[in-house]
Amino acid sequence: MHIALVRRVNDTHIFAAQAIQVLQDAKTGNLSVSRKDGKDKRYDVPSVKKAKFARRKPHEVKNIYSRFLDRELYENFIVSAISQMESFMFETLRLILMAYPHKLKINVKGLEIERTVSHCADQGH
């Protein structure tokens, strides 16, 4: 399991390095951000109804690239890496508890532990 985690984190790093380079190339004009006919470029965007498009002028697209290069891309990759680690930890804990369910009933000697599971409804959540 830990090898799969390391591979996923490595894959994320490889993707980040490639994405950063593509965005830098696009920002500096090495990739086209406008249509050949001079009209604003159209970008497919998610929609619940039918295909929707967002139109952006070349300077707006370059601003998007700058924003992601300066901050948002890195934040997204950090969130992704944390999510991958959390998934690994929860899967490891699940496997341990399935293999050793009796461990849930063991106390540290001399400590009284109240075993209750609160419900979110009881706390007003």
Image: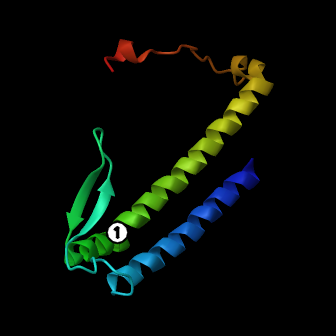
Residue 14, by quadrant, is bottom right
Mark 1: amino acid: Phe
Residue nearer the viewer, 89 or 37: 37
Q: Going 33% across and 86% down the picture, which residue do you hit?
A: 29
- Against 2, residue 110 (above or below) is above
Render colour scheme? rainbow
Between 116 and 88, the one lying in front of the other is 88
In the image, 37 versus 53, the foreground residue is: 37
Residue 112 point in image, percent of width and height:
61, 17
38 left or right of 101 in image:
left
Relative to 77, is 61 above or below? Answer: below
Q: Would residue 64 be found to the left or right of residue 1 on screen? A: left
Q: Position of residue 125 (x, y in %)?
A: 33, 21
Name the residue located 75 percent from the left edge and 23 percent from the top edge.
103
Is 66 drawn above or below residue 42 in the view shown? below
> How far across and how far down the image is residue 38, in percent?
20, 79
Left or right: 82 in relation to 10:
left
Quarter residue 6 falls in: bottom right
Residue at the image position 62 percent from the left and 60 percent from the top: 9
Q: Residue furthest right?
A: 99
Residue 89: percent from left, percent from top? 64, 42
The residue positioned farthest toward the front in the image shown: 37
Q: Indicate left or right for 123 with 96 as reference.
A: left
Q: How many marks?
A: 1
At mark 1, the secondary structure is helix
Q: Which residue is mark 1?
A: 68
Figure quadrant of residue 27: bottom left
Residue at x 37%, y 12% (from the top left corner): 122
Seen from the viewer's position, the closer of residues 62 and 38 is 38
- Label 1 environment density (alpha carbons within 10 Å; few <14, some 14–19, many ≥20): some
